[in-house]
Image: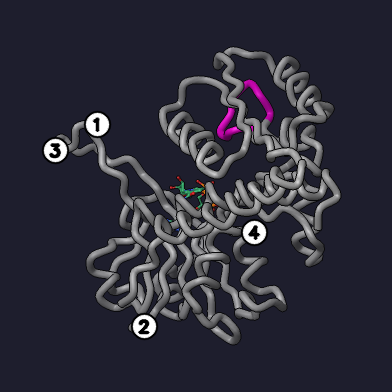
Amino acid sequence: MQLIDGKKTSGEVKIEIAKEVKEIVDKGGKAPHLVAVLVGEDGASKTYVGSKVRSCEEVGFKSTLLKFDADISEEKLLETVEQLNNDDDVDGFIVQLPLPKHISELKVTEAIDPNKDVDGFHPTNLGKMVLDLPTFLPATPFGIIQLLERYGIETSGKHCVVVGRSHIVGTPMSILMARKTKIGNCTVTLTHSRTKDIKAETLRADILIVALGRAEFVTADMVKDGVVVIDVGITRVPDASKKRGYALKGDVKFDEVAEKASFITPVPGGVGPMTVVSLLKNTLLSAKRRQGIN
Ligand code: NAP
């Protein structure tokens, strides 16, 4: 079994990004600028946004964090999105999801200029992804593609089973794995809560990508020998032995599944850090486009 070390790989990608940023700035260009919008006090959202902002600093980006109370009106949030769309100094921005119930996530996502949508959630960018056109790929699936590529994992002709069909992970992942590209060319099965016999499906997987948000859902009896396992899930499970009172668990029962897997991602330290660097990659791409750099 080989561990797919997302922390290490993300560190390598950050060094590559930092080098490119330095080259741009040395030639008189502008460092990429990412803005993160955070609404409310959700603990996980604050952690994710904090890590995104810190990563910007590490690679030489400019970053701005805009914080709003949970009771901000939808109108005011949409106004902020419009201002960011029109701000020439901003190369890309994200509105951290989930949003409070009184705000439509779809309305906010659709209001973002697709050219600054570095999360890759706008319908225009998702449409371009489906058509194999250059675009911002959604950050988590993009991170997984990079892990598969950097670990030299053969995907062509393999059977890929994806568990979970969210708009930000499962569904785009299933599309990317079926594309006619180097990382792609899989036969894909997309499963969800209405799938009749999930174990029968996961047992057929050469590559298993799990994103359902239920701690340790996938057990050893659900996978075949030699499977490649990508665990996207992050669930906080109460744990009195930890200072913060909880442990982070993936969707896969790591210890027992690892014994059968050829490759496997840990949680934490697998997909999560790659999601952050994918956001940085998208922001760098946007900054280069906006400055006419190839
Ligand atoms: P989500 O929107 O919560 O959707 C969960 C999906 O899992 C749904 O499609 C649901 O099916 C399916 N599902 C639920 N129970 C199931 C079951 N028993 N059998 C089969 N399918 C089942 O998913 P998400 O936003 O993609 O998040 C999934 C997990 O990934 C969460 O733990 C989240 O925190 C984590 N995550 C991690 C990262 C990262 O960077 N590492 C990024 C994003 C998300 P239905 O559609 O039928 O309801």
Q: Identify the residue position indicated by label 1 in the image.
A: 244
Q: CA distance from mark 1 to mark 2?
A: 36 Å
Q: Identify the residue position indicated by label 4 in the image.
A: 172
Q: Are the residues at dot 3 and dot 2 in contact (C-beta closer than 8 Å)?
A: no
- Where residue 263 sits: x, y (%)? 38, 74
When asked about the image quadrant of residue 290, the answer is top right
Q: Amino acid at mark 2?
A: Gly
Q: Which segment did they paint magenta? A: 95-104
- Where residue 97 sits: x, y (%)? 57, 34
Q: CA distance from mark 3 to mark 1?
A: 9 Å
- Where residue 227 sits: x, y (%)? 40, 78
* Disc 1 crowd, CA 10 A, few/some/many (<14, 14-19, 20+): few
Residue at 80% in and 26% down: 87
Q: Element type at marker 1? A: loop
- Where residue 272 sits: x, y (%)? 45, 50
Secondary structure of the magenta portion, mostly?
loop
Q: Can you see residue 166?
A: no
Q: Identify the residue position indicated by label 3 in the image.
A: 241
Q: Amino acid at mark 3?
A: Ser
Q: Can you see residue 164?
A: yes
When asked about the image quadrant of residue 203, the answer is bottom left
Say whether residue 98 is magenta: yes
Pick whichever, 28 or 109, lies toward us. 28
Pick whichever, 44 or 290, lies toward us. 290
Q: Identify the residue position indicated by label 2 in the image.
A: 226
Q: Element type at marker 3? A: loop
Q: Are the residues at dot 4 and dot 2 in contact (C-beta closer than 8 Å)?
A: no
Callout 3: CB less than 8 Å from ligand 1: no
Q: Amino acid at mark 1?
A: Arg
Instruction: Indicate which disc, 4 or 1, sits on the residue closer to the N terminus.
Output: 4
